[in-house]
Image (cartoon, helix red, strand yellow):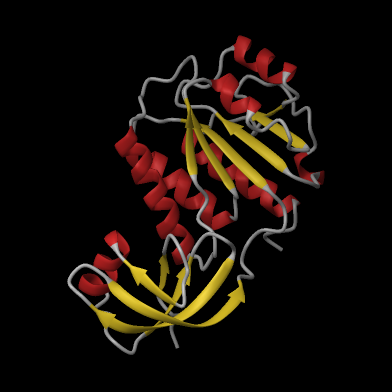
C-alpha cells in the first residue's frame, strides 16, 4: 500500500483549507476527491491525518482526524551553506539532496568568485523544491532556504553550531576529523570558483575548520552532497 499523499499548509485547524499550488496539485494532478485520506504538514514536526470533505473551485476542505509526531527528522541539527551556482538545476539538486539527507537549515550565499545572482523568484523556487523533497522522503518539516548577500553573513549565521566545516579545494589536510563528529554541524561549500585565501582566513577566524575532500577537485554540487552524506553518516543518521 502506497503512503498517503502529503501536503503543506500554513495553519492546521479542525477543518483545514488547502489552497494555492498544493490545492492545484491535489485536485488537477493527483485527482484527489471527497473522502480521500491525506497527511497535512505545517512545519511543526507534526503530521495530521485528514479526510477531504469538500472540493471547491479554489480550495479543498479537510477534516483533521488524527495528530502524530513525525519520526523522520534527523536527531542532530545540520546546516548546509553553499555558494549559489550558475546552473539553476544544480542549485535545485543540492537543495533536494540536502533535504533527503536530513539537513535542517539551508543557506545560499554569494562570495568572491560567485558569478550567478539570486532574486526573489529563484529563492521561491528553491523553497518549493525543499517542500517537494520533504514530501517525497516523508519528512514532516521542509527546511527554509535563505539567501545571504555575503559569505561572512552566511558564516555568522552558523555561529552557534558545535562543528563548523569549511570545504576548501586548496586545503592540504583536514583540520577536523569528520569521521568522529558529534553534535550540531554546519557545512560550507563554495560556488564554481571556490574560495579565496582571504575567505578561508575569514572562515578560520570565525571558528570554521577547513576540510579537504580528497585528491580530486569535485564539482560544487558533488562536494555538497558528498560532504553532507559523510557528515550524516558520522552523526549516525545513515546507519
Q: Is residue 227 in view from this perspective?
A: no
Quadrant of image for the N terminus:
bottom left
**Quadrant in the rendering for residue 21:** bottom left
Is 233 left or right of 195, judged from the image as shown? right
What is the x, y in percent for residue 228?
61, 45
User: Which residue is rendered at x = 51% and y = 75% of the image?
Assistant: 48
* Residue farthest to the top, as pictured: 198
User: Which residue is rendered at x = 59% and y = 64% of the image?
Assistant: 45
Is 63 left or right of 88, judged from the image as shown? right
Q: In the depicted view, which residue is nearer to us: 146 or 168?
A: 146
What is the x, y in percent for residue 211?
70, 29
Q: Is residue 25 in view from this perspective?
A: yes
Check the image and report above or below for 62 versus 89.
Answer: below
Check the image and report above or below for 237 versus 202.
Answer: below
What is the x, y in percent for residue 153?
58, 23
User: Which residue is rendered at x = 23% and y = 71% of the image?
Assistant: 29
Q: In the depicted view, which residue is nearer to us: 146 or 17?
A: 17
Q: In the depicted view, which residue is nearer to us: 207 or 40?
A: 40
User: Which residue is rendered at x = 41% and y = 39% of the image?
Assistant: 91
Check the image and report above or below for 197 versus 152.
Answer: above
Amino acid at each position: 500500500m502506497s503512503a498517503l499523499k502529503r501536503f503543506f499548509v500554513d495553519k492546521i485547524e479542525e477543518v483545514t483549507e488547502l489552497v494555492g499550488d498544493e490545492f492545484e496539485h491535489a485536485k488537477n494532478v493527483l485527482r484527489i476527491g471527497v473522502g480521500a485520506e491525506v497527511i497535512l504538514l505545517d512545519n511543526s514536526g507534526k503530521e495530521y491525518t485528514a479526510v477531504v470533505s469538500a472540493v471547491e473551485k479554489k480550495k479543498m476542505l479537510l477534516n483533521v482526524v488524527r495528530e502524530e509526531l513525525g519520526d523522520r527528522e534527523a536527531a542532530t541539527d545540520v546546516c548546509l551553506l553553499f555558494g549559489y551556482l550558475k546552473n539553476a538545476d544544480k542549485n535545485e539538486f543540492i537543495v533536494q539532496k540536502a533535504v533527503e539527507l536530513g539537513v535542517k537549515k539551508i543557506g545560499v550565499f554569494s562570495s568572491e568568485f560567485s558569478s550567478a545572482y539570486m532574486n526573489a523568484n529563484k529563492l521561491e523556487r528553491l523553497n518549493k523544491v525543499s517542500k517537494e523533497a520533504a514530501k517525497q522522503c516523508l519528512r514532516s518539516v521542509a527546511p527554509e532556504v535563505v539567501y545571504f548577500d555575503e559569505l561572512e553573513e552566511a558564516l555568522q549565521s552558523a555561529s552557534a553550531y558545535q562543528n563548523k566545516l569549511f570545504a576548501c579545494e586548496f586545503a592540504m589536510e583536514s583540520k577536523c576529523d569528520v569521521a568522529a563528529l558529534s553534535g550540531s554541524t554546519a557545512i560550507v561549500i563554495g560556488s564554481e570558483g571556490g574560495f579565496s585565501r582571504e575567505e578561508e582566513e575569514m572562515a578560520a577566524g570565525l571558528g570554521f575548520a577547513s576540510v579537504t575532500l580528497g585528491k580530486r577537485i569535485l564539482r560544487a554540487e558533488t562536494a555538497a552532497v558528498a560532504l553532507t552524506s559523510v557528515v550524516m553518516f558520522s552523526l549516525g543518521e545513515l546507519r
